[in-house]
Amino acid sequence: MPSSNITFDFNSKIDLKNKLEKMVSAAYQANRKFFGKDSSKIKITFLYQRAQMDKICKRKTQNWEVGHAFSQQNINHIAIFSPTVFDKVSNHPKSDFFYTLVHEIAHIFTHDLLGFYYPKWLHEGLAGYIAQQYRIRPVKYIYNFSKLHDSKNWNQYHHYPQAFSFTKYLIDKLGKKKMLQFLKNLPKTLGRHHYPKDFTQFFNEFFNADFNQLVSNWQQTVVCLLTDCF
């Protein structure tokens, strides 16, 4: 059974409750294992038509958009397409469903336990790290991280593979415990919204490391993976 702080709505004529419960429970536990704590209550709504996602997001959503985490009336919500229709209403294969579910639940944990939102690449990257989406989303090109920092730029470029890959690199290099301490201190020091240069300065001071050098080192590993130089 899922955690007692999770409820979900679904169409019983399409999905089996027991099957959904198992997936929700496994996705929640993946996040609980990473953070070592529970989140606040979460309501998950399984969707079956693109129009339902459009209504929740209050805009015309794109074909690749399959999950959405948000807060409404102090309740954490996740809207996600049912695994039954996942590949029919999007350009994702059905195998992406569980990764996406873990990813969206990770956003709730991040909101509750860390409270940071910028940089967007790191906000999305952490969710992708917990969901292990770096395994299925290889980096094919690289943007300057300043283009992935704020909501406006992220919405234009939204390069998830880069975010997933570099976040994994940072956690592997700097350690999970230290990274979580940094992320918890980030909004307290800079606020939820800030500029790339302020983030870089705080990062360098906190880790006593050079952010740009770490980016350069990571880029070399990506180039090698693409060109088989190992």
Image (cartoon, grey):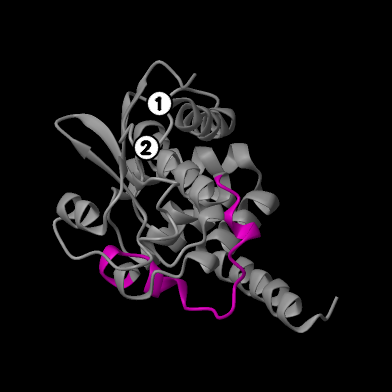
Which region shows up in magenta?
131-153
Which corner quadrant holds the C terminus? bottom right
Residue 167 vertical placement versus 98 (above, below): below
Which residue appears at 16% of the width and 62% of the height? 59
| Helix, strand or loop status at disc 2 | helix
Viewer-nearest residue: 33 or 2 = 2
Camera-side residue: 208 or 211?
Answer: 211
Residue 92 lies, in percent from the top left, at 47, 63
Report which quarter residue 187 is drawn in. top left
Pointer 2 with pointer 1, Cβ within 8 A: yes
Q: Is mark 1 on a helix, strand or loop?
A: loop
Residue 39 shows which numbered tag? 1
**Residue 140 among magenta residues:** yes
- Give the numbered dot on residue 10: none
- Give the x, y percent position of residue 2: 46, 22
Residue shown at 71%/80% (left/top)? 226
10 Å crowding of disc 1: few (<14), some (14-19), many (20+): many
Q: Residue 108 carries which label?
A: 2
Residue 61 found in image quarter: bottom left
Mark earlier in primary sequence (2, 1): 1
Asked if the magenta segment contains residue 186, the reply would be no
Q: Residue at x 47, y 77 (%)?
A: 144
Inspect the image, locate mark 2, and give the three-letter code of the amino acid beneath it. Ile
The answer to which of 97 and 177 lies nearer the viewer is 97
* Amino acid beneath label 1: Ser
In percent of width and height, residue 203 lies at 49, 55
Q: What residue occupies the far right of the structure in this picture?
A: 230
For the image, the number of numbered tags is 2
